[in-house]
Image: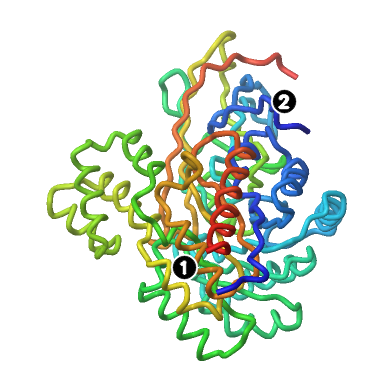
């Protein structure tokens, strides 16, 4: 590599630029939204305090969201217990949103907030909020 | 005073974080760059390899082949204590020990001579020393703001180091504790987060009195009407910028196993907010011959160029002091 030819890289935000992907996961229809960790380091999933998501202005109930990392799905309510499962800093994850109704084609307003703890800050368990808003298209069904 | 061999200047890959996490630089790219920035390389465990807190055989091979290819010297491995990783309780001393053991083994496997410990690892340190001996590692508590040399927490660490009496356990001072002023980087961040200018100025005035810790400063700001967000953002001035005297390094000289050259910006060849001239002078006077890692923590920029500028500044101070 060379410093006078910098690679373009990616813009970092919790919600990635990838299109929303309609899928059937474990027999349930829904769609996947790609997300990214916003720290500078890998974190165990127990450091995820909350994931908030809304689509076209309507909040998505947390029970409808499955956090999918390396192909394995976890309920948001279970993340606090998963201190031995690590989200590597360079890896994306997916939010699977269970939905009977298919998404309308075209762009959708996706708003998401990741709340994580940096588990060593001198003052104690300290939460960081990473809000992110994207307009994302819908990918062809695989 | 003459100085035959000054300390060595390398880099922590943490300096390249903004490029690394946005895929402009790969891990291997950063090793190549480290080869052009003094050759001494420090890494951050949970940032730079998968499988943390373990080090895989695959990463060992990747790292060592990079070390060989680019002629690097592994200097320090950044371990983490992460005592607050569970939502309902803090890790126990046993759990902190168990969490740190694979990190020490991983650091040794990669060829690092020094492991950075966080303050919270202190409850496990006594049990880690025999392992450090076995693995031929030196452990060092990082003295990063707010752990100024005079801070009670630092004095407790020093008392423990003295009590345990092992040269396997020492300190890694970070230049964040030798601030001349609150870094422009943190002031900019406070402005970006919407804190009113009058509150920023009030906090800077309080910081300038150089007599409060974060808790005391936040209590004063709170009593004057600062809301929770102001308390959090402005309190970080004390959490990230310390005001120890560089000359106080002499008091801890025998315990320094590594050094973090934290910086936020280089303006006209100098770090305007950190007392580098005095820090470098003291390091030379106390005969420190280990590594200083350039550790850039400012905003997105050409990270290679800014580290190069930082190292040029440190070397200029070395030669100025040696010539005096």
Q: Along the horizontal axis of the image, is A97 left or right of A23?
A: left
Quarter where residue B22 is shown: top right
Residue at the spot 49% in from the left edge and 85% down from the top edge: B160
Report which residue position mark 2 lands on.
A5
How far apart marks 2 and 1 lie (CA) works out to 46 Å
Q: Are marks 2 and 1 in contact (CB under 8 Å)?
A: no
Instruction: Identify the residue shown where x is 37% and y is 66%.
Output: B244
Q: Residues within 10 Å of mark 1 (few under 14, many from 20)?
A: some
In the picture, the quarter occupied by the N terminus of chain A is top right
The subunit letter for the residue under badge 2 reads A
Q: Is B220 positioned to the left or the right of B143 in the image? A: left
- Quarter that holds the C terminus of chain A: top right
Where residue A36 sits, quadrant-wise, is top right
SS for dot 2: loop
Using the image, determine if residue B132 lies above or below residue B89.
below
Does residue B134 sit above or below B147 in this rendering?
Answer: below
> In the picture, residue A61 is in which quadrant?
top left
Q: Nearer the viewer, residue B233 or A76?
A: B233
Foreground: B202 or B26?
Answer: B202
- The location of residue B124, given as percent across then percent down, is 56, 79
Residue underneath mark 1:
B90
Residue at point 33%, 40% (across, down): B190
Q: Which residue is painted at 60% across and 22% down in the image?
A: A17
Indicate the chain on which mark 1 is placed.
B
Q: Is residue A65 above or below residue B130?
A: above
Locate residue A115, reporting x and y percent.
Answer: 46, 43
Q: Nearer the viewer, mark 2 or mark 1?
A: 2
């Amino acid at each position: 590599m060379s410093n006078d030819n910098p690679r373009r890289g990616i813009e970092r935000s919790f919600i990635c630029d990838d299109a929303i992907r309609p899928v059937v996961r474990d027999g349930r229809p829904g769609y996947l939204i790609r997300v990214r960790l916003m720290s500078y380091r890998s974190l165990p999933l127990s450091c995820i305090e909350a994931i908030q998501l809304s689509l076209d202005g309507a909040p998505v109930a947390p029970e409808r969201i499955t956090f999918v990392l390396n192909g394995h799905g976890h309920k948001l309510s279970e993340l606090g217990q998963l201190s031995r499962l690590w989200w590597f800093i360079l890896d994306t994850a997916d939010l699977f949103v269970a939905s009977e109704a298919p998404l309308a084609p075209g762009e959708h307003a996706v708003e998401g907030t990741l709340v994580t703890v940096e588990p060593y800050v001198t003052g104690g368990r300290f939460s960081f909020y990473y809000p992110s808003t994207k307009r994302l298209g819908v990918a062809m069904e695989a | 005073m003459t100085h035959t061999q000054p300390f060595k200047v390398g880099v922590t890959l943490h300096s390249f974080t903004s490029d690394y996490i946005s895929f402009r630089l790969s891990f291997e790219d950063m090793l190549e760059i480290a080869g052009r920035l003094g050759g001494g390389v420090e890494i951050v465990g949970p940032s730079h390899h998968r499988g943390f807190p373990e080090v895989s055989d695959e990463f060992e091979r990747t790292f060592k082949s990079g070390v060989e290819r680019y002629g690097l010297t592994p200097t320090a491995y950044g371990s983490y204590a992460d005592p607050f990783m569970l939502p309902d309780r803090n890790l126990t001393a046993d759990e902190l020990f168990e969490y740190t053991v694979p990190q020490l083994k991983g650091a040794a496997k990669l060829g690092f001579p020094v492991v950075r410990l966080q303050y919270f690892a202190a409850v496990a340190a006594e049990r880690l020393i025999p392992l450090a001996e076995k693995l031929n590692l030196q452990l060092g508590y990082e003295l990063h703001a707010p752990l100024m040399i005079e801070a009670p927490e630092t004095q407790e660490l020093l008392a423990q180091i003295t009590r345990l009496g092992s040269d396997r356990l020492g300190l890694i001072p970070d230049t964040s504790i030798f601030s001349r002023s609150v870094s422009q980087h943190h002031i900019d961040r406070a402005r970006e987060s919407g804190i009113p200018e009058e509150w920023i100025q009030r906090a800077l005035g309080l910081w300038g009195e150089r007599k409060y810790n974060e808790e005391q400063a936040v209590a004063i700001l709170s009593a004057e009407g600062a809301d929770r967000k102001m308390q959090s953002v402005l309190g970080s001035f004390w959490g990230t910028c310390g005001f120890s005297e560089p000359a106080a390094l002499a008091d801890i000289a025998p315990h320094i196993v590594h050094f973090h050259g934290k910086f936020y910006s280089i303006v006209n060849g100098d770090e305007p907010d950190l007392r580098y001239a005095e820090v470098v002078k003291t390091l030379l006077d106390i005969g420190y011959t280990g590594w200083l890692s350039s550790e850039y923590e400012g905003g997105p920029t050409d990270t290679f160029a800014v580290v190069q500028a930082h190292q040029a500044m440190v070397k200029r101070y070395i030669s100025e002091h040696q010539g005096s």
